[in-house]
Image (spheres, rainbow, N blue to C red):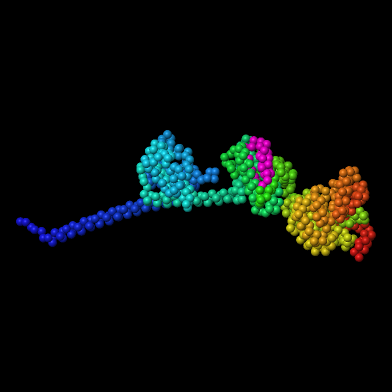
Amino acid sequence: MTTDTHPAASSDIARLERRLKREVAARHEAEAIAERGLRDLFQRQQEIALLESIAVAANEAKCVNDAMVRALEAVCRYMHWPLGHLWLIGERRQERCFESTKIWFDIVARDPGCPIQHLRAVTEASEFALGTGLPGQVVASAAPVWIDVAGTTKAILLRLDEIVRAGFASLFAFPVMIGSEVVAVLEFFSVERQQPNESLLRLMAQIGTQLGRVIERRRAQDQLVHDALHDPLTQLGNRKLFLDRLQRLLLRAMDGPDNDFAVLFVDLDRFKSINDGLGHQSGDQLIIGAARRLWDCLREADTIARDPALADERLVARLGGDEFVILLDSIGSAERAVMVAERIMATLAEPFEVAGQRVFVTASVGIALSATGYADVEDILRDADIAMYQAKKSGRARWVIFDRAMQLTALRRLQMEADLRDALAQSQLVLYYQPIVSLHADRISGFEALLRWQHPVRGLVPPNEFIPVAEEIGLIGQIGAWVLAQACRQLREWQHRFDMRLDMSVNVSAVQFNGDELAATVRQVLRDTGIAPSTLKLELTESAVMADAEHALVVLAHLKALGVRISLDDFGTGYSSLSYLRRLPIDTLKIDRSFVSQLDRLDDKRQIVDVVLMLAHALGLDVVAEGVETDAEQRLLRDMGSDFVQGYFYYKPLTSDAAALALAAQGDLLAVAGAHAIG
């Protein structure tokens, strides 16, 4: 029996079949979506794990190279790439270039003769311009680059032959970035043809940025270290770096005489006058120029440094101001150090162009030799400094090699500095007074105040020993003010006791004269003591005045406005110009004792004194002849017309009590004459 299917039933079945197909398709699509989602999630988790591992490795790494090694390993294992390599971007001859490194990750240990080892050797020896080769393309594009070995040429892939022999099918490289700057390139080699997808490109870009932060952090650390070890003005090494390198050589020198070295301490002569005259900015330009010349001078000497640890800037350092130190390695003999010192002096003696002007400086150089025998680097530097100071003291623009006698002198000087700082407070400074005698009246007309130091151990110290020290350590202003006040108080007392016409001569040091406080100090002393300004005579050496005659005119004008008188001491020794002599507002010339000694026996001295007397009187100046010791000298000066004399023939420098007795011994006639004069 045949059963006929109702049309309506067939339609329902077809509809159900279609629904079933749709549901199956939807289920399959959902399963596919879920599978893709799981794969993407797993992939993302793997990527995150890779990024985290690289971040941890970067943070734990001791240096950039260590971080790069860990990154190469992580990427190679993640991508199943058997070989990875690092290129760094450096600078050579002020141009950016590749620095091929020996940093690799190789999954499989290789025999020395295998093709991959040969590829590594060729790569490490390769030099690429920033736009050529695989690394060069990455730098040029600042983006990842993929190369199919089968589809390229040697013009694009310079190491193509070695890569093919090593069995690699594709290469991939990506940049390490700091902002928009490519600072390194990581390249990878694959035995399969693997073209990167968008996910891989994004991942490698993230890794490149992450590694860039490592290099950026290292750069910041390196900059901090550099700043701590280098002079900011010249970029030469500083004292700390120099002593570190010096310590290395000192330890090495202890092994034998073949390792002898030398330290040169270089100080520019006349730097302060240039710095003060042209300004600190010009002074800085001069320091930079001197540093550059020292650098170039040392680079020309190919035997100066043989120790690789002492390359480039480590040879020469700036300690500060105008002081430089130089380290000469393996000198062999003292003559080598002297040759370098003379070369340096000649180089620095050439004119500098500063602020549109040609300026000239010289250099004083102190040399300390390791052969002297040292155990401490500070001692070497100290002795080189002592030798440099001796060179300056000996006339500047010369070199001096340190010896032990200098150290003893330096120690005595240090002790003097320390003692001098306490001398005023402990009332060790005293004044002596040498009478100045009028040849017209045969009477004491005044005194010259002479400073002495009554040292508790050394006894009476003359000023030529301690005044230069006081000038250098900044005490001369304080001491000079004390001398001026003490001398004027003493003058006031003697004027009231003996003669109101008495005057007092007080020496002013060159440093005090060039300072800013002299006129103010004189004004205050005149106000405090109440003496007539015309009875105070300030004595200035000819050399101090003529060192800067224009400046001297300004200072002297301020002093003359106070009403004091000015005496030019040691006349004849400073080579003063007659034109300036006429312009200087001075009242007295003091003929130096070197011209007065044996005046009666030497015609040339007599002629010089005669000319000075005529010149002074023509200019309306009075004259004091110093150092008169014999009756013959005294009589000759009287006949020649000298106004005043002082010297041992009349009086040696006297204490205040002895000077008062000398005034009293002149009798009542002097006091009466003085009373009539003021009445």
Compared with 32, 334 (above or below) is: above
Residue 382 in view, yes or no: no
Q: Residue at x 73, y 54 (%)?
A: 474
Give the residues drawn in magenta, as a range: 324-352
Q: Residue furthest left?
A: 1
Image position, residue 436 (x, y; %): 88, 54
Judge left or right: residue 525 versus residue 502: left
Residue 340 in view, yes or no: yes
Q: In the image shown, does 10 or 281 lie closer to the viewer?
A: 281
Image position, residue 420 (x, y; %): 75, 53
Q: Residue at x 80, y 48 (%)?
A: 575
Q: In the image shown, does 259 or 638 lie closer to the viewer?
A: 638
Judge left or right: residue 544 versus residue 299: right
Number of disc labels: 0
Compared with 679, 320 (above or below) is: above
Q: Residue furthest bottom?
A: 679
Residue 334 is covered by the magenta coloring: yes
Image position, residue 350 (x, y; %): 68, 44
Q: In the image shown, does 442 or 180 lie closer to the viewer?
A: 180
Image quarter where the N terminus lies is bottom left
Judge left or right: residue 265 versus residue 70: right
Compared with 486, 98 (above or below) is: above
Q: Residue at x 89, y 53 (%)?
A: 643
Residue 538 placement: quadrant: bottom right
Image position, residue 478 (x, y; %): 75, 57
Q: Residue furthest top?
A: 113
Q: In the image shown, does 352 or 127 lie closer to the viewer?
A: 352
Residue 375 is covered by the magenta coloring: no
Image quarter where the C terminus lies is bottom right
